[in-house]
Image (spheres, rainbow, N blue to C red):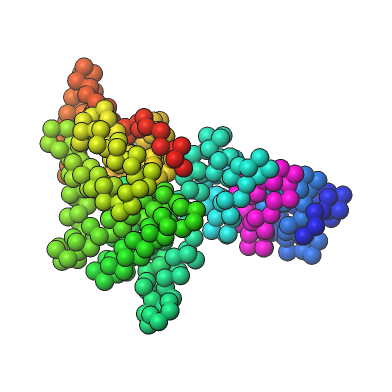
Amino acid sequence: MAASQKEDLSASERKILQVIAAGDVQEASHLLASKDVRVNCLDEYGMTPLMHAAYKGRADMCCLLLQHGADVNGNQLEYGYTALMFAGLSGKADITSMLLDAGAEKDRVNSVGRTAAQMAAFVGQHDCVTVINNFFSLARLEYYTRPQGVEGEPMLPHRLAGPLHKIIMTTNLNPVKIVMLVKENPVLVDVAALEKCYQVMDMLCEQCVKQQDMNEILAVKMHYISCVLQKCLAFLQKRDGKLDILVKNLLRGRDSDGFPQYQEKFIRDCIKKFPYCEATLLQQQVRIIRMIEIGSGNDPTAFSVLTQAITGQMTFADAHYCATCGEKGADKRCSLCKAVTYCSLMCKQLHWFTHKKMCRCMQEQDADPEMDTPRLKELKGAIYPVVIFDLISLQ
């Protein structure tokens, strides 16, 4: 579409830009229903209504515009910005994800060669960086739901694509969270289904490594998810179709300080088993975890090393995480020690069997601050150790 200057806009088109700024979705819907509004009209700077909505952080408005056929990759702005870049600048991870789902191209660059992820990182919007770097289209996964070549059956039954894609798209890499995602989808709690899922994950991992523009981040993530799915499979085969024991093993804390040794060892093993030893990201991860002793207190955990490598999050400070599933923004505290946080009552109940061993110690520590130890500092508020190694440069 040729660039339309503001003086070429109809009165309704000028009005919809004002309505977007005000956030009046009902009025915007009414205007878009008329023939006087082109959904991809441009203002004098070359910005579309979708760009305005993304920059203003109006998720409901972005959804409405996309439903009316807004061009998610339009970039006739003077500096080559796209709606995805504006979403990253606004710090709205939900809009960022919405635009990616609608087909936004994350590798597009502006006039100075910056991608949406790089622009978001520059202004400190790391949640948006994480969403962009970890995006994997459902269409790419659905390729495996169709028979290929002489194959009579698809590698992945279509009913598994949606639940598996949800797991792939998660930015919370806590193994408990991934097992919980498996548990909440009955179609996945099946030996045959998990076998197909982890085999597809292994193939995707190989593709990410061997494709022309190698993506080590997604390769490591696909491998890690495959390892968790294989662990789920092993427990289903041994425990009569139940994953509760696996969750308990992952959560069980060391008697002396509550450190989850089983979870730490499992994640370390996942990292070490990555099959493509030449990968720079893997080499860096292995180097780091070899330098640290399991559960040593001040050093980063294997989970924090993995999370930083895949999501690009440089620090976990000033953010509370669920002590059970690692979900960010947990705001439900233990009613006794008031120190550990959870994202839900269910997570609180799941964790109690092991937390109760440390709960009294935390209460006593509050009464005597001199008892504070590195492990107690970590447990209070469920803040994971800060990772001091610079992995983000590898992205």
> Foreground: 205 or 79?
205
- Does residue 111 appear to the left or right of 259 in the view shown? right
Q: Quadrant of residue 151?
A: bottom left
- Residue 70 on the magenta segment: yes
| Vertical comparison of 194 with 353: above or below | below
Q: Position of residue 191 (x, y in %)?
A: 24, 69
377 vs 113: above or below? above
Q: Which residues are magenta?
A: 60-85
In the image, is 312 to the left or to the right of 235?
right
**Residue drawn at (58%, 59%), measured in percent from left and top?**
103
Q: Residue at x 73, y 57 (%)?
A: 40
Q: Report the residue that reaches farthest toward the left.
A: 255
**Which is nearer the eye, 130 or 240?**
130
Q: Quadrant of residue 275?
A: bottom left
Q: Position of residue 320 (x, y in %)?
A: 36, 36
Front residue (pair 306, 46): 306
